[in-house]
C-alpha cells in the first residue's frame, strides 16, 4: 500500500470525528459499537477500544447486516468476540428487524442505558440501526461511506437518547487485505483502488470460498480450475459486456460484480475467517 492511499483512507474529518467522539464518551453511559457481520474483524476500529479503556461504560457490540452474513460464522464470531471482550455484550443485528429491535431495546432498558453513543466505521449501518430503534427515519442512510457528516442526539423513547456519529477509520491498516475487504462492503470508496484489481481480488476470494455462488449468479460453468482473470473473462462473455471491436469490457464487469456483492446478490457470505491477519 502506498502512503497516498493511507492519507485518503483517513481524511481530516475522520481525525476530527475521533476527537469529538472521545469528548462525547464522557456524556454517555453506554457505547454501542457497530460492526459489519460479514467482516467482524476487519470492520472493528481499534481506536474505539482504546477510547473505551479506563472508562466504565456499558459496551454493546452489534454485528449488523447479519442477514447478509453466513449465520454459522456469525455465531462463531460472536462467541470469539465475547470471549475477548468479557465486559461487553455481543449481539447479531439486522436493521429494521422487529425482533432485533425488541431485543436491543430490552437490553438498553435492563442496563439502564439513558444516553448511548453509536459508533463504527463508515457504511456499517449506524444510521439504519438508529432509525430502527427510533422506529422512524431520523438519521440519513445510504449504501456508501460518509453519509453521516455530523453528530446529533436522537430521542428513542422517554428513557433513551442516541448520539449518532460519523463513521471513522484508523490511520493505517495492518494489511492490504483489510483495505480490500472494507472496499468490498463499501466502507472505503472503491474509487481509491483500481476497480478491476479490486474486483479481481473479490473474484479470487469467492472462487476459493463460495465458487457455486459465482457460477449461479452469472450463469457460468464450473470454475474450480480457472484463474481469476479467466473467470473475469467468462463473466464478460456471458453478460455480453463488450467494447467496440469485440474487446471485453472489464470495467463494467468489475463495477457490476462489486455492486452485486455490496447488495448481497451472492447470498449470505462471511469474508473474515479465524486466524487471518
Image: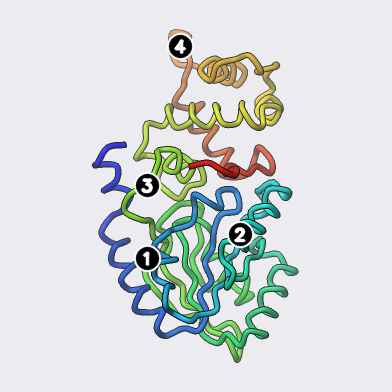
Nearest to the eye among marks 2 and 4: give it. 2
Name the residue beneath numbered marker 4.
247
Looking at the image, which residue is at 62% across and 74% down?
133
Residue under pointer 1: 149
Residue under numbered circle 3: 173
Label number found at residue 241: none
Q: Nearer the viewer, mark 1 or mark 4?
A: 1
Task: Name the N-terminal-most of marks 2 and 4.
Answer: 2
Distance Cα–Cα, label 2 vs label 4: 42 Å
- What is the secondary structure assignment of the residue under circle 1? loop
Identify the element where label 2 is drawn: strand
Upstream in the sequence, badge 1 or badge 3? Answer: 1
Tell me which corner region of the image, top left, top right, bottom left or bottom right, holds residue 157.
bottom right
Tell us which disc is closer to us: 2 or 1. 2
Where is residue 248? Give x, y as percent: 48, 15
Left or right: residue 49 compared with residue 239: left
Closer to the chain start, of discs 3 and 4, is 3
Please tell me which residue is depicted at 63% across the width and 81% down the height of the picture: 108
Q: Are marks 2 and 3 in contact (CB under 8 Å)?
A: no
Q: Of discs 1 and 3, which sits in the foreground?
A: 3
Image: 201 above or below 227: below
Secondary-structure class at tag 3: loop
**Location of mark 2 (residue):** 63
The quadrant in which residue 84 appears is bottom right
Please report whichever mark, 1 or 4, sits nearer to the chain's N-terminal start: 1
Gap in angstroms between the C-alphas marked 2 and 1 = 22 Å
Q: How far apart are marks 1 and 4 (CA)?
A: 42 Å
> Neighbour class for label 1 at 10 Å: few (<14), some, many (≥20)?
some
Amino acid at each position: 500500500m502506498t502512503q497516498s492511499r493511507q492519507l485518503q483512507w483517513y481524511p481530516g474529518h475522520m481525525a476530527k470525528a475521533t476527537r469529538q467522539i472521545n469528548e462525547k464518551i464522557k456524556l454517555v453511559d453506554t457505547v454501542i459499537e457497530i460492526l459489519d457481520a460479514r467482516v467482524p474483524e476487519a470492520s472493528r476500529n481499534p481506536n474505539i477500544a482504546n477510547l473505551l479503556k479506563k472508562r466504565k461504560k456499558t459496551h454493546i457490540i452489534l454485528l449488523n447486516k447479519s442477514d447478509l452474513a453466513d449465520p454459522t460464522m456469525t455465531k462463531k464470531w460472536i462467541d470469539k468476540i465475547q470471549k475477548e471482550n468479557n465486559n461487553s455484550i455481543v449481539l447479531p443485528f439486522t436493521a429494521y428487524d422487529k425482533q432485533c429491535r425488541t431485543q436491543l431495546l430490552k437490553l438498553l432498558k435492563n442496563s439502564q442505558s439513558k444516553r448511548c453513543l453509536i459508533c463504527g466505521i463508515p457504511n456499517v449501518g449506524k444510521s439504519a440501526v438508529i432509525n430502527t430503534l427510533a422506529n422512524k427515519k431520523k438519521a440519513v442512510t445510504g449504501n456508501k461511506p460518509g453519509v453521516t457528516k455530523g453528530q446529533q442526539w436522537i430521542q428513542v423513547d422517554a428513557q433513551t437518547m442516541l448520539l449518532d456519529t460519523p463513521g471513522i477509520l484508523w490511520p493505517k491498516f495492518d494489511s492490504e487485505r483489510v483495505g480490500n475487504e472494507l472496499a468490498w462492503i463499501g466502507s472505503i470508496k472503491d474509487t481509491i483502488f483500481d476497480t478491476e484489481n479490486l474486483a479481481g481480488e473479490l473474484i479470487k476470494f469467492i472462487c476459493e470460498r463460495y465458487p457455486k455462488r459465482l457460477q449461479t449468479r452469472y450463469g457460468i460453468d464450473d470454475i474450480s480450475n480457472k484463474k481469476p482473470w479467466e473467470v473475469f473473462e467468462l463473466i464478460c462473455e456471458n453478460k455480453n459486456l463488450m467494447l467496440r471491436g469485440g474487446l471485453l469490457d472489464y470495467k463494467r464487469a468489475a463495477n457490476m460484480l462489486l455492486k452485486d456483492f455490496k447488495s448481497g446478490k451472492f447470498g449470505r457470505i462471511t469474508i473474515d475467517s479465524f486466524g487471518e491477519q
